[in-house]
Image: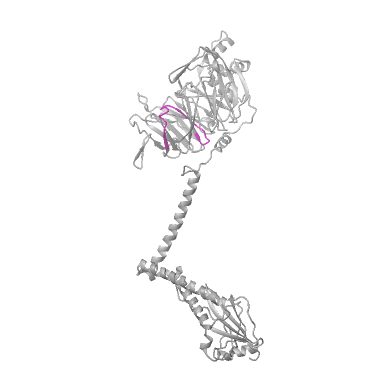
Amino acid sequence: MAMFPSLVLLSFLVFLALTHSQPGKEISYRRLSRPLIGHDGKVYACSEKDLLAFESNGTIAWILHLNYTCSFDMPPVHGGKENMYFVADNNRVLQVSLFNNGTSKPSAEVLLSTEPTKEGDGEIVGLAVSTVSSSVYVNIRRRGLFAYTSRGQLLWSAGPVIDQHGYQQGCRKNIADCYFNSVPVIDQCEASLYISNTAGELYSLSIRSPHFKWIQDLSSYEKVFSITPGNNGRLYISVPTKARLLALDVSSGNVLWEGIIGPLSTADHTPVVDSNGWISIGSLDGYLYTFSPTGVLKKFSKAAAINSVIQVTPFLDCTGFAVYIAQTEMEGKISHTVGEYTFVSALKPKGVVFTLYVPATGSIYWSGRYPGAQFSSLISHSDLHHFILDERIVLAFVAASKTGNPLACRSMRQKFMSSCSQVRPKLANIYTGSQRAILLFLLFESVILVLLAGLVRFCCIFWSKKKVQGQNLGTFLEKRRSLRLKKKAFDRTITELEQKAANEAVADNEALEKLGSLLQEREGIQRKLSTTYSLGRDRITSRSKSLLPLYDGKSRSHFQGAKKKSVAVFHTLSDASSPKEHSSDGESSWTSYEDKGKEPLEQESSSESESFTKDHRKSSSETASSSRRFVDHDEGEVQSLHEMRIGGRSFSLKKRRTMSSTN
């Protein structure tokens, strides 16, 4: 749906009211440009070569005479508390210092001047001011976008086409007749500038450098559209001919949502965004279309929509949460659609309904009608009766006077903080699809990475060892396989011998010696199969010192061992000097002990120590025997203790036989 409306102004109605209120008096009429409500509550507008500042009640605060004619379609632009900028003669940018008005120093000076051609090249299309960087941005027809300081120094310039990394960006379809054709707008929260070209492409630039953040092609909607910054993480595009409103993501330029609106009054009709993030735009069908930040639509009409139109952009109130709207009641309004276009026509206006409306809640704070006593007094008893007024001018004074507003006003900084706080950072999502499939894929990736890390580490250690650098890998692996087979065979044999020794009541020394030998051989194979040995990191380390007492030839005995260990001292007898054992009268049993070196096993008397010393002097080979016997003189028992190491621990097989009383 689209439109080609006829703009109906309130000027005719105001002219009739003034003529009847002052009969027989000659009245001079002056035309005012689009107004601007200042931070100080005043209304600023140009009239020919004068810049006027009005109080909110309609009286003139001051008039600044200029040597140039102001642009009627471009309102003045705020430049902070001290400065104001506006376009004059379509080729000059004037800077007005508000605090210097009435002093000897000139309060208005030319910041920029161009020389346009007969075809219009060089004319100023629009300007924008950033209070954050104190910069002025000017779009000059067919010449590009220029950034200046507040003193008129050129910072940088940019055109619609740029080559980055060998790729052309901008004006992809037609370079010859492509240039910036829109008024630049600034998002104060994002510190970004937005502008469009004649090909329907939208640009996002940094306010500090001519760097293109992104370019979005919107030519599928229309090549001509208006841009409105949301200051809430969104950028709004209104397409008059298609009656569409688009919401774009400021970080990427992607379209978040789009909504259908009614026909608009002009091609440059723009919406307004409040501090709640709601965007409002009026339509010729008599409705105010309001959209939430997520695209939820609300339609509002105070008067009968079938006989009314909304022609002008709403004004924000001083709080930033509500909007003032002007709904004009028409006589003989007719709407008809031909193809994609909607035509709206009317005879004349009958009156205007002004409303203070909160889009987020749908609340109506105030509503008034013109003609009426309140507005008739405002116009007739103020300086406004010297000017031709329309809905836009009257609505600006209604908003500046805070008519019907019960809320406390907020500063511009507070408004920006409220709207900027709505921006939510978004995390980039590199995976799309089923959540279960994503989790399984991540788990599979993790397993593969762990396996690869282990394999790389093994290979690095393997090839870095001199022990295996000159050997064949196949030979090395075959050797390890044969060692594993031998270890399994030893395990089976040792298990069988241990079970046999446990089941039999009597076990000879030969079986015990065989079992100890097998255990030692298995331990050697197990050490060779370990990672440190296989990769060449095995070293010959000195074995732990014996915990048994040693004889030094001088003293009786002493101990060697680690601290904090308890040591059991036994009498060691050789096989030759052992008394004969009476198997017929004795009783034998086998017990396995684990020597952890933590608790003492037995305490020996001084006589037993002396006996041990004498036996120890007999032969060094006897003390190294794998079978050691101990005699308990009190109980008359002979004990045989066989030590073995299994898995790094020390085990002992103890054979106890009860001797006869005669021995």
Report if residue 92 lies within the magenta region: no
Image vertical order of residue 549 relative to residue 242, above or below: below
Residue drawn at x 65%, y 91% is 662
Regarding residue 154, the answer to whether it shows in the image is: no
Residue 455 percent across, percent down from the top left: 42, 60
Residue 338 percent across, percent down from the top left: 44, 17
Q: Residue furthest left?
A: 176
Report if residue 224 lies within the magenta region: yes
Q: Nearer the viewer, residue 36 or 278?
A: 278
Q: Which residues are magenta?
A: 214-234
Residue 524 percent across, percent down from the top left: 46, 74
Q: Residue furthest top?
A: 24
Number of numbered markers: 0
Image vertical order of residue 453 relative to residue 471, above or below: above
Residue drawn at x 59%, y 11% is 21
Q: Is 438 on the left or on the right of 608, as rendered?
A: left
Question: In the rendered image, which quarter is residue 351 located in?
Answer: top right
Q: How is the image coloured?
A: one colour
Regarding residue 429, the answer to whether it shows in the image is: yes
Residue 464 percent across, percent down from the top left: 39, 66
